[in-house]
Image (spheres, rainbow, N blue to C red):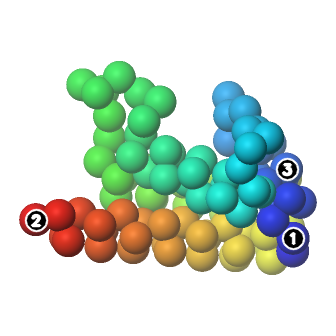
């Protein structure tokens, strides 16, 4: 599926996210997912750890009636890739 169509569908699953015109759809999707995993839209004292956020996101994607099975698979893969990139970045900074 093309990134724009996936972004549009994903925006219906996660709420309160604005599409930024200056980012490519794939980059926008990755940004949203990174923000979600790092829980950046929550007050710092209330944030959940990224593994908990990952679990919640995957559960939300799987249970969504707004996404086709292929879309779910693609989004889950992007979540996995983003989580791995965050982990790699954290380990390289230590």
Closer mark to the observer between disc 3 and disc 2 = 2
Q: Is residue 27 left or right of residue 9?
A: left
Local crowd size for mark 1, using a 10 Å CA cut-off: few (<14), some (14–19), many (≥20): few
The image shows residue 6 at horizontal and vertical percentages of 82, 61
Front one among 22 and 53: 22
In the image: residue 3, left or right of residue 29? right
User: Of helix, strand and loop, which one carries label 1?
Assistant: loop
- Determine which residue is flagged by label 3: 8
Residue 80 percent location from the top left of the image: 50, 72
Residue 18 figure quarter: top right
Where residue 21 sits, quadrant-wise, is: top right
Q: What is the CA distance from the residue labelled 1 to the residue labelled 2?
A: 36 Å
Classed neighbour count for the residue bearing mark 3: other residues with Cα under 10 Å, few (<14), some (14–19), many (≥20): few
Which quarter shows the N terminus?
bottom right
In the figure, residue 4 lies in which quadrant? bottom right
Query: Which SS class for mark 2?
Result: loop
Q: Which residue is mark 2?
A: 94
Tally of numbered discs: 3
Query: Tag 3, which secondary structure?
Result: helix
Task: Give the residue furthest to the front.
Answer: 22
Disc 3 to disc 2, how far (Cα)? 37 Å
Residue tagged 1: 2
Q: Earlier in the sequence, mark 3 or mark 2?
A: 3
Mark closer to the chain start, 1 or 2: 1
Image quarter of the C terminus: bottom left
Position above or below: 25 against 76? above
The image position of residue 59, as x and y in percent, is 57, 58
The relative height of residue 56 versus residue 62 in the rendered view (above or below) is above
């Amino acid at each position: 599926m093309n990134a724009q169509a996936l972004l549009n569908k994903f925006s219906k699953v996660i709420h309160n996210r604005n599409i930024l015109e200056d980012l490519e759809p794939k980059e926008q999707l990755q940004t949203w997912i990174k923000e979600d995993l790092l829980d950046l839209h929550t007050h710092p004292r209330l944030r959940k750890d990224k593994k908990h956020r990952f679990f919640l996101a995957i559960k939300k994607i799987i249970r969504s009636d707004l996404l086709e099975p292929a879309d779910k698979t693609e989004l889950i893969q992007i979540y996995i890739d983003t989580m791995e990139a965050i982990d790699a970045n954290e380990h390289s900074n230590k």
